[in-house]
Image: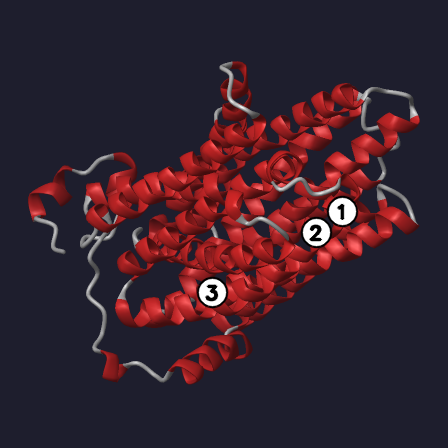
């Protein structure tokens, strides 16, 4: 799809950062799709407890075990599907595959209330894994495709705001639909089913809008592309040949582990301490939710700030700085004795939010810079896979430390993980500087 020179000349602000073949409408559509995608990424996890309780009637003592089992199934299928979607997008283009991926996700969301039993849930989870993979890899790839190189960090920083708004929309609007419906006379089972179908409707809307409004990129003829397995192997070996891609993959592992730690063990820490102190669950949830809100708000500032920094200095330097900040943030969190001490937790949570979102923007910008256009989808798919492995490893190891050592031990563990990435970044910076001399 070509863009006329008059439109390019009239661009202002964020739209002046786009490649010349990307229209203003393409960019607006992508940010809208990123907002919907981020809403849907956490949609099922937020609503699944009520689905278990009210629709599938699964005993409470089985909720944790089944959730863990579904996470393993999801990660297993998603890792393979991410690589396939990434390689296919380099061959067939990203617009069609995004619409296919999010339509698959819409189907999975629709089927959730009809799962019936554990076997049905596992089958639906296979579909969810494929839909998540297609949606996340295509959004990540297009966010790298659209900006000019010198504005890549700024564009990803602005896109992080769209992602944050998706999380707020989920927390403030979507999760309140069941309560609104039950007050109007719907049964809890009907209310949660309707909420799932609202999510499926949003996914379908994004598929249609994306198919119409995203850039209709021109890809190289299929015969110029390497075979599937060869292409996947070459993208993985790129980390061996390119020290910056190697740093990006390691940073992806750590940054996604950081994100998962805040989403899983952070609220459990509050609940553990609060219950020992005799607090009510609702009071604990209110406080942990407020602190999560502080982390989210700090992320709104961190995304654009780190994005702008990434465009001003070497991107491997930005990654090193941000992971040093993350190491400090998680170490300080691990040293906190009372998470209900607001004078201590407010600055710690601000630091966590800056580090968490800043790390995602910094390493995403570095990988996008180093990934050639013709293999970008495949390299970003590997980046997403390493991130998924980071989530699984850090949550499993962190959960073990939480139970066997102390509720704050997982945060100290993440301080060490981030410190290792910081030293890898420092080593990469030295090697790059030596090469440039």
In the picture, which quadrant includes the N terminus? bottom left
Asked if residue 301 shows in the view, the reply is: no
In this rendering, is residue 62 above or below 55?
Answer: below
Residue for badge 3? 82
Q: Position of residue 90 (x, y in %)?
A: 32, 70
Q: In this view, does 298 lie to the left or right of 395?
A: left
Q: In this view, does 44 lie to the left or right of 411?
A: left
Q: Nearer the viewer, mark 2 or mark 3?
A: 2
Q: How many marks?
A: 3
> How far apart, in angstroms, are the residues tagged by discs 1 and 2?
6 Å
Residue 62, numbered label: 1
Question: Mark 2: which secondary structure?
Answer: helix
Q: Which residue is drawn at 67% across and 26% down?
A: 289
In this rendering, is residue 120 above or below 294?
Answer: below
Q: Is residue 357 left or right of residue 327?
A: left
- In front: 7, or 400? 400
Q: Which residue is drawn at 64% across and 54% down?
A: 118
Q: Where is residue 92 in the image (x, y as percent from the top left)?
A: 27, 69
Q: Position of residue 347 (x, y in %)?
A: 71, 27
Nearest to N terminus: mark 3 or mark 1: 1
Question: Mark 3: which secondary structure?
Answer: helix
Residue 66, numbered label: 2
- Report which quarter residue 365 is drawn in: bottom left
- In front: 216, or 7? 216
Q: Where is residue 82 in the image (x, y as percent from the top left)?
A: 47, 65
Residue 369, numbered label: none
Kindly check if marks 1 and 2 are in contact, taking CB atoms under 8 A apart as contact.
yes
> How far apart, in angstroms, are the residues tagged by discs 3 and 1?
30 Å
Mark 3 neighbour density, 10 Å: few (under 14) some (14–19) many (20 or more)? many
In this rendering, is residue 176 above or below 411?
Answer: above
Mark 1 neighbour density, 10 Å: few (under 14) some (14–19) many (20 or more)? few
């Amino acid at each position: 799809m070509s863009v006329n020179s008059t439109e390019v000349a009239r661009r202002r602000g964020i739209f002046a950062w786009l490649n010349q073949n990307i229209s203003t409408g393409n960019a607006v559509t992508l940010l809208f799709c990123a907002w919907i995608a981020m809403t849907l990424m956490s949609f099922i996890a937020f609503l699944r407890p009520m689905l278990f309780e009210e629709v599938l009637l699964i005993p409470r003592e089985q909720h944790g075990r089944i959730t863990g089992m579904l996470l393993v199934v999801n990660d297993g299928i998603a890792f393979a599907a991410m690589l396939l979607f990434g390689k296919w997008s380099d061959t067939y283009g990203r617009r069609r595959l995004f619409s296919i991926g999010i339509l698959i996700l819409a189907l999975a969301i629709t089927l959730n209330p009809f799962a019936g039993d554990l076997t049905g849930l596992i089958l639906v989870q296979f579909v969810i894994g494929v839909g998540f993979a297609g949606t996340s890899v295509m959004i990540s790839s297009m966010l790298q495709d659209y900006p000019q190189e010198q504005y890549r960090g700024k564009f990803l920083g602005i896109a992080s705001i769209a992602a944050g708004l998706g999380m707020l929309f989920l927390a403030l609007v979507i999760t309140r639909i069941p309560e609104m419906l039950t007050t109007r006379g719907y049964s809890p089972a009907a209310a949660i089913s309707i909420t799932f179908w609202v999510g499926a409707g949003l996914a379908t809307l994004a598929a249609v809008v994306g198919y119409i409004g995203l850039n209709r990129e021109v890809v190289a003829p299929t015969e110029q592309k390497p075979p599937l397995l060869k292409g996947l192997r070459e993208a993985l070996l790129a980390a061996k040949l390119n020290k910056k891609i190697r740093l990006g993959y390691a940073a992806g592992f750590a940054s996604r582990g950081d994100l998962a730690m805040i989403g899983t063990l952070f609220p459990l820490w509050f609940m553990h301490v609060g219950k020992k102190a005799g607090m009510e669950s609702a009071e604990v949830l209110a406080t942990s939710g407020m602190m999560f809100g502080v982390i989210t708000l700090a992320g709104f500032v961190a995304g654009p700030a780190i994005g702008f920094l990434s465009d001003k200095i070497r991107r491997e330097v930005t990654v090193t700085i941000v992971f040093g900040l993350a190491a400090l943030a998680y170490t300080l969190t691990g040293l906190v004795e009372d998470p209900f001490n607001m004078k201590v937790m407010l600055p710690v949570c601000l630091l966590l939010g800056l580090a968490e979102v800043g790390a995602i923007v910094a390493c995403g910008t570095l990988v996008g810079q180093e990934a050639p256009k013709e293999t970008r989808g495949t390299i970003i798919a590997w980046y997403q896979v390493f991130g998924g492995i980071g989530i699984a490893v850090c949550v499993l190891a962190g959960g073990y430390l939480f139970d066997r050592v102390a509720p704050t031990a997982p945060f100290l563990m993440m301080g060490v993980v981030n410190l290792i990435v910081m030293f890898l970044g420092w080593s990469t910076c030295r090697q790059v500087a030596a090469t440039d001399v």
